[in-house]
Amino acid sequence: MKKEEKIRLGISIGDLNGIGSEVVLKTFEDSRMLDFCTPVIFASVKNLSFLKKHYKSPVNLHGVDKTSQVLDGKINVLNVWKEGVNINFGKEDQKIGEYAIKSLVAATKALKENEIDVLVTAPINKRSIQSEEFKFPGHTDYLDQELEGNSLMFMITDELKVGLLTDHVAIKDIATTITPELIHQKINTIHQALKQDFGISKPKIAVLGINPHSGDNGVIGKEDEEILKPTIQEINESGKLVYGPYAADSFFGSDNYKVFDAIVASYHDQGLIPFKTLSFGKGVNYTAGLNKVRTSPDHGTAFEIAGKNKADNSSFKEAVFTALKIFKRREEYQELTKNPLKKQARKPQKKSFEGKK
């Protein structure tokens, strides 16, 4: 990307019956946002105009039918569909779920084809998106299939970063899902993300135990002793600063998390309950480990307040800024990690080259 070009920020609109469209519109009511990026909302200008009117939003929308028509300085709405959509705020609706997926599929395709630089996803309803064509529990799993790399749900703020060994896995399946191979993969992903995406040269990572009190030396389950501990030791011996397993019940209350750059939780609620308690409204869900940048707010569709103009857009705005920052850091990291020998080889040629002018 040329330096003078603004970062193209793709936005999938999520569930139209939820608060996604409201937080998107509120975020871009601040005209200064257009100084940082060029938004491209994958939806329908007809629907967005209706929502703009409903929320009495002052934004100006620029409807386009293809990405080549996108303009800097405008809030671009790419028409993924043009027919009318019946929006019923706060209602779970399979048809609305289909439009959420149409938006996501179109935005992901544009991301893969470099027509947008980053993707921010508005919240979806996990049940209404299910169909014969789409059988993923959420955004992360779909993007893992479509993009390169191994995805990892990484909940982040400036002060707290929590990654998951397992995300949308039933409690009864967690212990059998966590294997040494999975632990290696997830911790390697987090380690690389901390270096590449957050500029931390020697990341320090804590791992939470699977069982209460990390198994109490095998008294409450053997998974921590037989799987987690030896694998963490192997990773540590490879030169990474990885510690644990720590008992999850006291880890956050004791402020122990502040000593580490990231915490790895064994399962969804073990990590997300403390994260959302400490950071709700400020947190961002970042899909680490992929070749493209995707973020989302740390909340769901919030059907109970949808359409009432009560939604707080802080987390969505933070998701936008996080995506932009990570994109820039990745560019810098790639520049810094290019083969230094090639750079050095060019230096002595400079003088002779100038002499040929």
Image: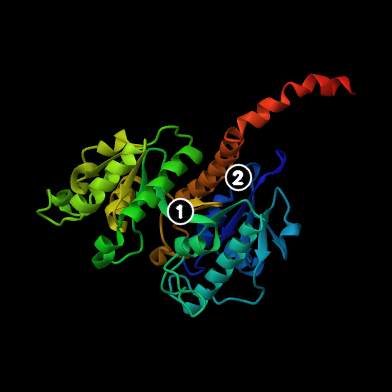
Q: Nearer the viewer, residue 300 or 257?
A: 257
Q: Describe the element under mark 2 as helix, strand or loop.
A: helix
Question: Could you tell me if residue 34 is visible in this image?
Answer: yes
Considering every residue shown, the one lying at the far left of the view is 219
Figure quadrant of the C terminus:
top right
Above-or-below relation of 266 to 194? below
Above-or-below relation of 341 to 102? above
Q: Residue at x 58, y 67 (%)?
A: 105
Q: Is residue 213 left or right of residue 300?
A: left
For disc 1, the neighbor class at 10 Å (few under 14, some 14 to 19, many from 20) is many
For disc 2, the neighbor class at 10 Å (few under 14, some 14 to 19, many from 20) is some
Q: Nearer the viewer, residue 243 or 108?
A: 243
| Circle 2 residue | 33
Residue 91, quarter of picture: bottom left
Q: Is residue 133 left or right of residue 283?
A: right
Q: Is residue 231 left or right of residue 133?
A: left
Q: Residue at x 52, y 68 (%)?
A: 16
Q: Position of residue 268 (x, y in %)?
A: 32, 57
| Circle 1 residue | 297
Residue type, label 2: Met
- Give the Cα separation between the discs numbered 1 and 2: 17 Å
Q: Position of residue 304 (x, y in %)?
A: 38, 66
Q: Is residue 206 left or right of residue 215?
A: right
Which numbered disc, 1 or 2, marks the residue that appears first in the sequence?
2
Residue type, label 1: Pro
Circle number at residue 277? none
Q: Residue at x 64, y 54 (%)?
A: 116
Figure quadrant of the N terminus:
top right
Q: Describe the element under mark 1 as helix, strand or loop.
A: strand
Considering every residue shown, the one lying at the far bottom of the view is 132
Question: Could you tell me if residue 208 is visible in this image?
Answer: no
